[in-house]
């Protein structure tokens, strides 16, 4: 193998390693209003069904208490998608965990803090 071939092979190997773990789904803004939790999802891949799981924790002083876990399946069309999950939150601080799955595999997960 020539030096140029080794260099080219090394470059492609580094490119492959850099791309490992990249996802086409991401969670943007998470907010609450009018009895709905609104989650913005960016989809840079093909349109299709995506599982959305949401866990809501109420923050109290130095503790957090799980209030609920809910999930739904949504069809993502286009780049920016907004979903609304109906739920009631009292005034206070919350930690929201959002998990996105596609084809049974977790694509991404985020934690957002909101105040109602």
Image (cartoon, rainbow, N blue to C red):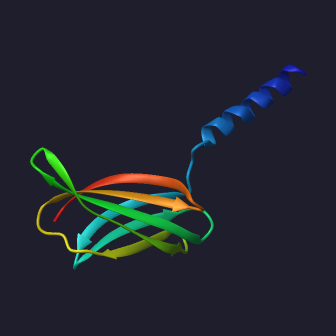
Which residue appears farthest toward the right when viewing the image? 1
Q: Residue at x 67, y 32 (%)?
A: 14
User: Toward which corner of the image does residue 32 lie, by quadrant?
Assistant: bottom left
Q: Residue at x 27, y 66 (%)?
A: 31
Q: Position of residue 52 (x, y in %)?
A: 44, 65
Tell whether 85 sits left or right of 95.
right
Q: Which of these two is toward me, 6 or 20?
A: 20
Placement of 83 over or under 111, stated as above or below = below
Tell whether 59 sits left or right of 41.
left
Q: Which of these two is toward me, 54 or 29?
A: 54
Q: Which of these two is toward me, 91 or 66?
A: 66
User: Toward which corner of the image does residue 103 lie, by quadrant?
Assistant: bottom right
Q: Residue at x 30, y 55 (%)?
A: 112
> How many numbered badges does the structure rendering display?
0
Q: Quadrant of the N terminus?
A: top right
Q: Residue at x 47, y 57 (%)?
A: 26
Q: Position of residue 50 (x, y in %)?
A: 52, 67
Placement of 25 over or under 9, stated as above or below = below
Q: Quadrant of the C terminus?
A: bottom left
Which residue appears farthest toward the bottom when viewing the image? 34
User: Toward which corner of the image does residue 4 lie, by quadrant?
Assistant: top right
Placement of 68 over or under 97, stated as above or below = below
Q: Position of residue 85 (x, y in %)?
A: 34, 74
Tell whether 33 sits left or right of 82.
left
């Amino acid at each position: 193998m020539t030096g140029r071939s080794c260099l080219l092979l090394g470059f492609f190997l580094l490119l492959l390693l850099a791309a490992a773990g990249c996802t086409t789904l991401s969670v943007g803004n998470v907010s609450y209003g009018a009895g709905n939790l609104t989650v913005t999802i960016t989809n840079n891949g093909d349109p299709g069904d995506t599982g959305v799981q949401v866990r809501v924790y109420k923050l109290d002083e130095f503790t957090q208490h799980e209030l609920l876990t809910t999930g739904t399946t949504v069809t993502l069309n286009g780049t920016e998608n907004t979903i609304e999950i109906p739920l009631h939150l009292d005034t206070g601080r919350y930690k929201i965990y959002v998990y996105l799955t596609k084809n049974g595999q977790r694509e991404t997960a985020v934690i957002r803090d909101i105040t109602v």
